[in-house]
């Protein structure tokens, strides 16, 4: 370690005195002007992680659904997964070390993690379309180079595309080519193969309107569309040519405001979807003949996918265990439908795909989606092996179903292991010895999976929506002086602190039918999130407002008191 060079460069990326940031739900996020030092230091940390794992590590510069003025950084571990929790702690320590302590923290991490500093390091970098992203990714590069790491800067990418690049590189190209064309070809091939088998291929199934949140999704979908145009034609809106990133559009806006994005004309019963700012989330929606807006969120996406997978397994004659993982935001109706109608076990974890992913790994097939549209399906190595054998051996009808399942696995952007992962990965992290490797939730791949399933099943968007009726719900944000005063338990469904808050919520919930409410500090924005559901929209709105007032009073609200409606 050339400590002199690190000190010199670090001074060029100096930390504002006293600024404290946490590695939150999905990395660091705050106003872009506060992030230069964090980016430089995450470049350093990525080099250490790369040396320790003898693998390529990814650094994505993005603040995803946050406003354009924010930015952030997510680190990607060797198999395309989120950074390991122990390294999240290192990241927080390094980002918050005052200038004079930075070297010591760096050395501490190297010693604690037994990093061989002589080992080569390789880091791949991607960024979203925010005005601040290019400069901030240059700060990452400064951090990488000052520690002697090699790097490849992919420039503009969606977050899932960077995950793809990381595991392509760490699997020596065996999974796919670590290029943007490689990604387009891999997903499109699986999609086109699948949709060829669809008997419903009329225009209704072939066209989709996509709101790209004025973000990176627009650029990438435009580059990709001709690869899959045989099976689907997409019309892009909010493509960044005029509007602001995530402003009045995008998956987060549509989900939390329960209304269509601006800048998109929707005719009745047209199928539409929205990506978020870095294209790792997707939600669907449509207007019915009476002009009412219907949202189809991550819960209904999980239901569609898990029911399709279950049907395929029945056709193949395999009884493998499927589980669905949700968070506290999952609509009560979705949980009931999955458990009571589909007879699928459902589990609830804390917010953040890293938590859902972990739980989903316990099943042969684990489908996990947050209500906000972030999710995917995981297939164990055992499933992949069985399906592969079935695709080769079974009689016609079963073979067809097995082939479909193989294509679905590819389309989920999941690494197919052929059971030989050990021999070609420098390091793997399987906790149960099953060698599972994974794909991140990816709006583009999820969109293609959903479109393929709808076409194969001959389902219209209205029929999909009609699987069950969502309980009316409302999400609100409350500003408090320090959101860390709120701590939670039971997968974030109960508040532990501040004292009295949970009791207040319990009393409020009792006033409404079929009601539920919870609060939690956001891990990506400086707000407390409030969720409420009840038997009518009016009740859900009232309950959410009353809970917001309780948070404001008991958790140190700042600014204007929450207003009704
Ligand atoms: C990130 C995480 C998601 C999480 C969301 C909101 O999404 O990847 O798992 O649901 O933040 O988290 P919070 O409520 O803690 O702010 P994205 O799309 O912004 O990266």
Image (cartoon, rainbow, N blue to C red):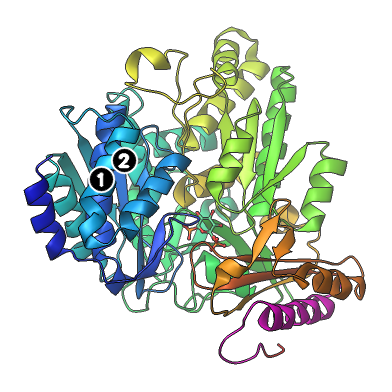
Q: Quadrant of residue 62?
A: bottom left
Residue tagged by mark 2?
109
Q: Is residue 341 left or right of residue 183?
A: right
Query: Counting other residues with Cα less than 10 Å from the Cα at mark 1, is it few (<14), some (14-19), or many (20 or more)?
Result: many
Contact check, label 1 and label 2, Cβ < 8 Å:
yes
Residue occupying image coordinates x 33% and y 79%: 242
Residue 178 appearing in the image: no
Asked if the stretch drawn in magenta spans residue 541, the answer is: yes
Q: 323 and 15: which one is in front?
A: 15
Residue 371 picture location, percent across and down: 64, 57
Residue 15 vertical position relative to residue 560 in the rendered view, above or below: above
Residue occupying image coordinates x 65% and y 61%: 487
Mark number displayed over residue 106: 1
Query: Start and end of the magenta stretch?
Result: 536-562
Q: 228 and 474: which one is in front?
A: 474
Residue occupying image coordinates x 7% and y 49%: 4
């Amino acid at each position: 370690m050339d400590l002199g060079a690190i000190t010199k460069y670090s001074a060029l990326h100096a930390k504002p005195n006293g600024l404290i940031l946490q590695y939150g739900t999905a990395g660091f996020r705050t106003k872009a002007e506060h992030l230069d030092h964090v980016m430089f230091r995450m470049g350093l940390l990525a080099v250490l992680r790369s040396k320790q794992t003898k693998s390529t590590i990814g650094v994505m510069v993005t603040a995803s659904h946050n406003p354009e003025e924010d930015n952030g950084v997510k680190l990607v571990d060797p198999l395309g997964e989120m950074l390991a929790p122990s390294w999240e702690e290192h990241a927080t320590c390094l980002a918050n070390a005052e200038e004079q302590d930075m070297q010591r923290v760096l050395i501490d991490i190297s010693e604690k993690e037994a990093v061989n500093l002589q080992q080569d390091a390789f880091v791949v970098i991607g960024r979203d379309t925010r005005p601040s992203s290019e400069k901030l990714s240059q700060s990452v590069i400064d951090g990488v180079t000052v520690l002697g790491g090699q790097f490849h800067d992919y420039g503009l990418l969606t977050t899932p595309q960077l995950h793809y690049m990381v595991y392509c590189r760490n699997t020596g190209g065996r999974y796919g080519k670590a290029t943007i064309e490689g990604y387009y070809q891999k997903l499109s091939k699986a999609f086109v193969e699948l949709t060829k088998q669809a008997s419903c291929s009329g225009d209704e199934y072939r066209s989709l309107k996509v709101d790209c949140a004025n973000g990176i999704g627009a650029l990438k979908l435009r580059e990709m569309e001709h690869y899959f145009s045989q099976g689907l034609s997409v019309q892009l809106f909010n493509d960044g040519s005029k509007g602001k990133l995530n402003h009045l559009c995008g998956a987060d806006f549509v989900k939390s405001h329960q209304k269509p994005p601006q800048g998109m004309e929707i005719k009745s019963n047209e199928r539409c979807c929205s990506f978020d700012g870095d294209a790792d989330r997707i939600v669907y929606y449509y207007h019915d003949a009476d002009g009412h807006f219907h949202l189809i969120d991550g819960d209904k996406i999980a239901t569609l996918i898990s029911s399709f997978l279950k049907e395929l397994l029945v056709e193949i004659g395999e009884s493998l265990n499927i589980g669905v993982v949700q968070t506290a935001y999952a609509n009560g109706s979705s949980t009931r439908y999955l458990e009571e109608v589909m007879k699928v076990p459902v589990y609830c974890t804390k917010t953040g795909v890293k938590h859902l992913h972990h739980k989903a790994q316990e099943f042969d097939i684990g489908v996990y989606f947050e209500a906000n549209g972030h999710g995917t399906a995981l297939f164990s190595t055992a499933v992949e092996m069985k399906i592969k054998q079935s695709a080769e051996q079974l009689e016609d009808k079963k073979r067809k179903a097995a082939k479909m399942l193989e294509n679905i696995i590819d389309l989920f952007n999941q690494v197919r292991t052929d059971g030989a992962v050990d021999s070609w990965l420098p390091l793997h992290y399987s906790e149960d010895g099953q060698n599972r490797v994974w794909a991140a939730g990816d709006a583009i791949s999820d969109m293609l999976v959903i479109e393929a399933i709808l076409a194969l099943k001959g389902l219209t968007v209205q029929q999909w929506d009609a699987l069950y009726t969502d309980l009316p719900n409302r999400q609100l944000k409350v500003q408090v002086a320090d959101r860390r005063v709120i701590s939670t338990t039971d997968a974030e469904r109960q508040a532990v602190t501040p004292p009295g808050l949970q009791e207040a919520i319990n009393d409020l919930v009792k006033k409404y039918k079929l009601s539920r409410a919870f609060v939690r500090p956001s891990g990506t924005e400086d707000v407390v999130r409030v969720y409420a559901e009840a038997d009518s929209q009016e009740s859900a709105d009232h309950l959410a407002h009353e809970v917001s007032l309780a948070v404001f009073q008991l958790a140190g609200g700042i600014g204007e008191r929450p207003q009704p409606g």
